[in-house]
Amino acid sequence: MGHVNHSRTNSRHFLVINPNTNVNVTASIRQTMVNITPPDVTTEVTSPSTGPHAIESQQDKNVATQQVLTLIKQRQEETFAGYIMACFDDIAITEARAITQRPVISLAEASMRSAATAGGIFTVITTFDNAVPTIVALSESYGLGQRCRVVATGIGVTDTAAQTERAEERLHTAITTAIQCGSKAIVLGSGAFAGRAQTLSEHYHIDVTDGFREALEYTMRQPYLADNASA
């Protein structure tokens, strides 16, 4: 599984949670974290044992939130230094922050704040159309609503992760349209895009982020509040 450390007081050990149960998405996220995790840091990627295969409705979100919170509570004694929610939503963010002293951040907040530093407008490309209003609301909550475009490929998480021909065509169209509209950066708005930011950035010659590196850097910058500081 790669970067796993079971030390109870390791201030450089972070838990990355994929809220859905799609093993292909989790595998992509795991490989992405292996590629970006510094040598002196450990990251573990996991997902709930039960819950929605893809989070594409409010009911899916409600179930996933409870499953994620259960997972965090079950593993709190391992004293992770921070948690990354590997999805483009606010799933379990507020609730997780209420039950742990550790920093908790989503791909959405990490990537949108990073994209905003490019100046001008940026475009978030997500998967299914129903995700757009949620992402728009998130951008507004971060104070970035005026600078953020949100579009959907209309392709679900499963096909996006599998990089089907139709999914790739829709992604290409969304990126080229964003560039034509003057976007200074592209945000990949789904965990299903894990690991693709650098390749797409090089191909289209525009800053592309999926939020993973930024989320890890954020959690690493936060002070470690050990429950057992003397341990």
Image: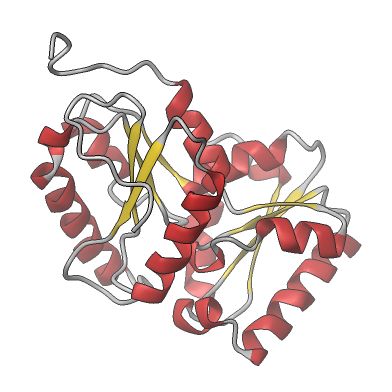
**Above or below: residue 97 compared with residue 225:** below
Residue 176 location in percent, x, y?
84, 69
**Which image quadrant for residue 112?**
top right
Residue 213 location in percent, x, y?
56, 42
**Which image quadrant for residue 98?**
top left
Q: Quadrant of the C terminus?
A: top left
Residue at 52 percent of width and 32 percent of height:
217
118 sits to left or right of 195: right
Residue 116 location in percent, x, y?
70, 38
98 sits to left or right of 81: left
Any part of residue 144 in sight: yes
Any part of residue 141 in sight: no
Task: Please count the marks in the image.
Answer: 0
Q: Quadrant of the N terminus?
A: bottom left
**Relative depth, front residue between 158 and 227:** 227
Residue 162 location in percent, x, y?
52, 82
Residue at 58 percent of width and 81 percent of height:
154
**Relative depth, front residue between 185 and 154:** 185
**Above or below: residue 139 compared with residue 154:** above
